Image (cartoon, rainbow, N blue to C red):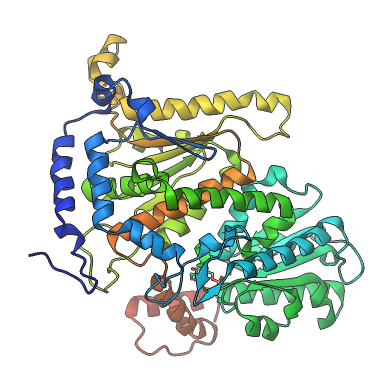
Amino acid sequence: MSEMNAEGRSRLDQLPEWTALGKHREQMAQVHLRELFERDPGRAERYTLQVGDLHLDFSKQLVTDETLRLLRDLAAATGVAELRDAMFRGEKINITEQRSVLHVALRAPASEAIMSDGENVVPGVHHVLTRMGTFSDRVRSGDWKGHTGRRIKTVVNIGIGGSDLGPAMAYEALRAYSHRDMQFRFVSNVDGADLHEAVRDLDPAETLFIVASKTFTTIETITNATSARDWLLTGLGAGQEAVAKHFVAVSTNAGKVAEFGIDTDNMFEFWDWVGGRYSYDSAIGLSLMVAIGPERFREMLAGFHLVDEHFRSAPPEENAPLLLGLLGVWYGNFWDAQAHAVLPYSHYLSKFTAYLQQLDMESDGKSVDREGRRVDWQTGPVVWGTPGTNGQHAYYQLLHQGTKLIPADFIGFARPVDDLQPGLVAQHDLLMANLFAQGQALAFGKTPEEVRAEGVAEELVPHKTFPGNRPTTTILAGELSPSVLGQLVALYEHKVFVQGAVWNIDSFDQWGVELGKVLAKRVEPALTEGAEVPGLDASTAGLVAKYRALRGR
Ligand code: F6P
C-alpha cells in the first residue's frame, strides 16, 4: 500500500507511474541520440512545438515517444492540470501563506474575470496599468518635472530580488526599444558601492527614484532608498518637499510607503497574490514601462498572456511548459542531473539566466512537500548560464567533456534588433552558427573512430573524443520583441509551476530566505557596537572579532 496524504495523493515515489519511469530510464541508459536520430528520420520534425513566436526543438532530448508518454502519465497522476486550473481559478494554492497565485491576472485582457476572495481582480490590474501609463508618458515626454523644474533624465530603480531582477533583466532585453535619451539604472545590493556607482555621475535635479518593494520592509531596499533620499536632498539643498518630485513607490504596503515619506498619490499598487519573482509585469515593471513606453509594455503583457492561454488549454502532447517541466523532472529525478543551464545567444538577454535563477530556485528549491513531510526525491535544479558565445570560451568544456550531465536550453533569434549598424548585423549569422553548432556537438559528439580518421595520434584520441548524448532544447524566435520576451518568461514561469506540481511542493513561498535575514539583524550590533550576541557560535564569533579588529574597533 502506498502512503497517502490528506488529499488522498500517494507519495510521488510510490506511484506506479514513477516506477514505470525508473524502469524506462534503465532501458534508455544504453541509447544514444545518434541512434535515436538514425532510427527515426522524422524525429527532428515531430519533436518540435510552436507556441506563438517560439519554435521549440526538443529532438535533442534523451526521450522517445515512450518517455514522453510516461512523463505525461506522471503529470496526470500528480494532478498538474488540476493544480494549474486551481491557480487560474484564484484558489489559494500558496498554502503556507494562504494566498492565491495570480500573476496570470496581471496580463489578462480587461474583458476577462479572474477571481480572488470573491472579487474580480482584473479591473484593478487595468486601473494600475492606466495610471502607470499616464505617469510613464509624463516622464518620457518631460512633462513630469523635478523639484527645480528640470526634466527627468535618469530613472533609478531601487529594489531587490523580484523587485530588481525582473525590471533589470527586461530593461536590458528591450534596451533597443527604450527611450535612448534617458538612462535607466538598477540598485539592489545593500553594499553602498551599488548606490554610489549608480548615482555618482548623476544630477539629482534630473533623477527620479522608483522604490520597488512588495512589502516595503526589505532592509536592503529601505536602506538604499533612505541613502538615496539623503543624496537627493543634500544635492538639491532642499527639504522633504522635494521628495514628491523625485521619489515614487511600487508596493502592496501603503502604510509603510507613507511612513517613508512618499506621497501615496505617487504609489503604484499591486497585490499579495503576486509573488515577488512573478511580479515584473505588475507595477514592479514601472521602470521598464518608462523605458519602453506603455504601448510596448502592453505588447509584452500580450506575449505573456498568449503563453498563459497555451498552458491553460493546449493538450498535454502540445503543451510546451508542461513538456519543459516534465523534462526537468526526467533529468533531475531519473538521471540525477543536479543543474540546468540556460544559454541565451543574445547579448540583450545577459540578465535572463540570473532572473530565472530566482524564478526557479526560489520557487522549487524546497525539501518538504505540501504537507510538510521531507521529500525523498530531488527538487529544483541549480540554474545557471551566461550568454553565448562567451560561455563557449569558459565553461562549455565541462558541458562537452565533463563527468556531469547538464541539460541545457539554447535561446536564439533569427534577426538582430533593428538599430544595429549594418556591419554588426552581419555578425548575427556567426552568432547563430555558434548556437546551432553547440547543440549539434553536445548531442552527437565525435567518436574515437572519427577522431582517428583525422589522423590524430592514438594517445590523444581519448582527449579529442566527444561523448555527445548531452540533452538540449533550442528555442528560436524571429526577434527579441517585447511580446517575445513576455512569451519566454511565461514559458519558464509555467515550467517551474509544472515541476513544483509534480514534486508536490509549494512553489510560491520562500521561507528559506528568512533565517539569514533574522541572523543578520542579530549580528549587526556585534559588528557596530561590539554587542554580545547570546548563543553565537564560535566560528561566527571569531569572524566578528576579526572583522572588528580589521576595522580598528
Ligand atoms: O527575501 C526574498 C524576497 O522576499 C523575494 O522573494 C522578493 O522578491 C525580495 O525578497 C524582495 O522583496 P520586496 O519586494 O518585498 O522588497
- Rendering coords of residue 473 (x, y %): 40, 37
* In front of the other: 369 or 367: 369
User: Can you say whether 422 is above or below 192 in the image?
Assistant: above
Which residue sits at x=85%, y=65%? Answer: 144
Q: Is residue 147 left or right of residue 520?
A: right
Q: So how many labels did they put on this image?
A: 0
Q: Quadrant of the N terminus?
A: bottom left
User: Can you say whether 310 is above or below 135 in the image?
Assistant: above
| Location of residue 398 (image quadrant) | top left
* In front of the other: 90 or 161: 90
Identity of the residue furthest to the left in this view? 1
Can the viewer see residue 427?
yes
- Rendering coords of residue 451 (x, y %): 29, 16
* In front of the other: 166 or 92: 92
Which residue sits at x=78%, y=64%? Answer: 135
Which residue sits at x=77%, y=66%? Answer: 208
Which residue sits at x=49%, y=53%? Answer: 308
Identity of the residue furthest to the right in this view? 149
- Rendering coords of residue 514 (x, y %): 43, 76
Q: Is residue 53 left or right of residue 471?
A: right
Q: Is residue 268 left or right of residue 84?
A: right
- Rendering coords of residue 521 (x, y %): 49, 82
Can the viewer see residue 353?
no
Q: Quadrant of the C terminus?
A: bottom right
